[in-house]
Image (cartoon, helix red, strand yellow):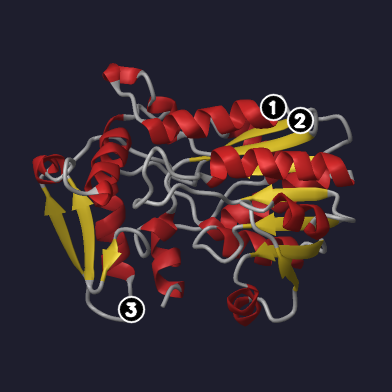
Amino acid sequence: MHIAIIGATGMLGRPVAHELSKAGFTVRILARDVVKARLIFPDVDIVTGDLRDPATLTDALRGIDIVYLNLSIKQSEKQTDFHTESEGLRNLIEAAKRVGVRRIGYLSSIIMRYQGMNDFNWWVFAIKNEAVRCIKDAGLDFSIFYPSCFMDSINGTQRVGRFVLLVGRSAVRPWYVSAQDYGKQVARAFQIAQPGENQEYVIQGPEAITQHEAAHRFVAAYQTEKLTIVTTPPFLMRLGRSFSAQADYGWHITEALNNYPEVFEAERTWNDLGKPKTTIEQFAKRVR
């Protein structure tokens, strides 16, 4: 089976691409920067593909059975900008239909469900919810994944040098999952998917812990250097919202993460795709 991946070079796309290759799929990576992508994936077919340019998508998707999307809205983006999960997604769907792609796989988010709770309304979550509706209405088979928090974020978006940054404190206990375990589940989902069957899976890790518990356990187990956890009060980020797109993004995502009432929903996912096994400590010891 031939799978194309858009967003393979990112923090969450890279492990999925590796796991799909290990599972025996023929992988093709669509990238705007082909040279950069080849440095990361020297043994994978890589072609030019740009969600802004439908012509490149049509050529890149020929012969593909499944296209997997690892898209995101950057912290620097404004509501009026081009977004890969809205205009880009529509371009992708039209190209996929044109060349006979049978299934779309999409990394969504469980946290986006916070939209509408406690009067929370954020244009980023509106786009993400609309992306799900767009995929479901496309007329192609789909596999949509709704993950909880990724362990990788602790060493990624929350890491600045030797500091792990947290905003506020929350009693919410997300089910942290590693991107590698998630990649294995994506591969399994595509292996068992039947023509005409649509899939929706909540992705949750082996245990529920607070963000501060996750950070402290990561720091304690991390072996490359000594890290320090820094917790800032949310009001500081709130003050910067009018002056910085990054601060506005940070405040909104933190508000959702700190308040979304996550409960365990992954029993069917574990039964169908396997239970994630990586603990925070195991993840911390293998990252560099």
Q: What residue do we see at 63% from left, 52% from top?
A: 51
For label 1, the crowd category at 10 Å Cα-Cα, with few meaning under 14, some 14 to 19 and many 20 or more, is: some
Q: Is residue 233 left or right of residue 76?
A: left
Disc ID at residue 136: 1
Tag 3 near tag 2, CB within 8 Å: no
Vertical placement of 146 versus 120: above or below? below
| Closer to us: 50 or 5 | 50
Q: Amino acid at mark 1?
A: Lys
In percent of width and height, residue 173 lies at 33, 38
Q: Secondary structure at mark 1?
A: helix
For label 2, the crowd category at 10 Å Cα-Cα, with few meaning under 14, some 14 to 19 and many 20 or more, is: some
Vertical placement of 217 versus 147: above or below? below
Tag 2 near tag 1, CB within 8 Å: yes
Q: Secondary structure at mark 2?
A: loop
Q: Which residue is mark 2?
A: 198
In percent of width and height, residue 174 lies at 38, 40
Between tags 2 and 1, which lies in front?
1
Q: In the rendered image, is residue 242 in sight?
A: yes
The image quarter in which residue 208 lies? top left
Q: What residue do we see at 21% from left, 52% from top?
A: 166
Q: Which residue is mark 3?
A: 223
Q: What residue do we see at 62% from left, 79% from top?
A: 35
Q: Amino acid at mark 2?
A: Asn
The tally of labels here is: 3
Q: Is residue 35 left or right of residue 221?
A: right
Q: Is residue 77 left or right of residue 188?
A: left
Tell me how far mark 3 sits from mark 2, CA to CA.
42 Å
Q: Amino acid at mark 3?
A: Gln
